[in-house]
Image: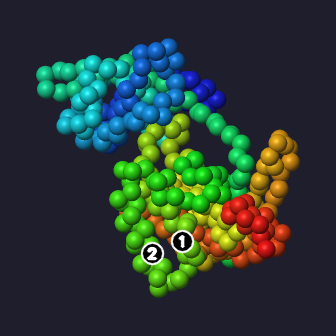
Amino acid sequence: MPKNDQNYDLTGIERDLVLQYLMDGNVPVTLTPIDESQLENKVHSIPSQIFPVALKPDHLKVHKNGKINLHNPPQSVLGFLDKTVKVEFYFNRVGLFFISKVTQEKNNLTIFIPKNISRIKEVVEEPEYDFSAQLYFEFKNKKELNFKAIPWDKEELFTRPVWKSIPLENQHKAKDYLESFVEIAKTERNIGNGLQLIPVCNFLTYQEAQNVQAMEDRKTPLYILYVDHERIVLGAKKTSEKLFENDEYGIKFSFLIKNSPILSRDIFITAKVNKIYTNEDSSKECFDCLYTNLQEEDLRFLYEKATKRLFI
């Protein structure tokens, strides 16, 4: 498949290979209902408020003529009857999709694979952040790094974390995590005032749509969940870089100066991974990193930015 054509439709031979791949089974897919207006541009991004529904291979029976029978699909899929859907899946790590309609045949929901199967368009987003970080050195092995860390968009940095930032439907589970973390901290005494545990619990319990991407298992950045004058907390997904407890890292903080598109302030620190928090299925981790070396003028800057109080 050409690597430079983001809107590439498969040829007949390639389509036959994909069809055989689907017939052989063990291919999870996602279904997303789409508006008819999207049909003119089939690679239009999925609206953020619409969540794809994942189907396991045992829900699918693919036939040589391109018919897919859905066996005992999730209840949410039953509402897709007579609707146009985007069907997405991976073939050799490449994200593919086609557009079709969900119909009913006897007792089964059915989808027909159309003539056109396309690659998922590569979406490259490079938003600017007022604050970002880069892990550039790992001291234990004297290893150069280039791990990017960006603000997580579900938390506001440099403000006091509040419990209501956690979606209501996640708060019960988040409370269980919080109680567990606090109980452990009573013996370890390493969480300070504990404010960072709120965004940690938010990140570990947050439910996100598992959209099929242009390439499977592409690296994702680390996410900055919390930062003050003593620590930075980073969140990681399965495809993010992994940090290790008690390891020490060199980190560069970059702040854009307000009202200036070109001026920035960089702060260089070292920090040790003090604690790692993990969710139940180990799909997410949070790294609580305590500073081990920070210049006094930078400490003052971070303190005043995080607390909104003058450093005395």
Distance (Cα) linking label 2 and label 1: 8 Å
Quadrant the N terminus occupies: top right
Q: For the residue labelled by badge 1, is the local secondary structure a helix, a strand or a loop?
A: loop
Residue at 82% across, 73% down? 296
Query: Answer yes or no: do the residues labelled 2 and 1 have beta carbons within 8 Å?
Result: yes
Q: For the residue labelled by badge 2, is the local secondary structure a helix, a strand or a loop?
A: helix
- Front one among 42 and 38: 38
Residue 213 visible (yes or no): yes
Residue at 70% across, 53% down? 132
Q: In the figure, is residue 248 to the left or right of 188? A: right
> How far from the left and from the top, in percent, is residue 272?
65, 74
Residue at 65% across, 73% down? 290
- Front one among 218 and 294: 294
Q: Amino acid at mark 2?
A: Val
Crowding at dot 2, Cα within 10 Å, few <14 / some 14-19 / many 20+, comes out as some
Task: Please identify the quarter of the rendering in which residue 149 is found.
Answer: bottom right
- Front one among 7 and 184: 184
- Per the image, the residue denoted by label 1 is 194
Q: In the figure, is residue 215 to the left or right of 111? A: right
> How far from the left and from the top, in percent, is residue 298?
80, 67
> How far from the left and from the top, in percent, is residue 275?
54, 73
> How far from the left and from the top, in percent, is residue 33?
37, 26
Q: In the figure, is residue 259 to the left or right of 211? A: right
Q: Amino acid at mark 1?
A: Gly
Quadrant the C terminus occupies: bottom right
- Per the image, the residue denoted by label 2 is 182
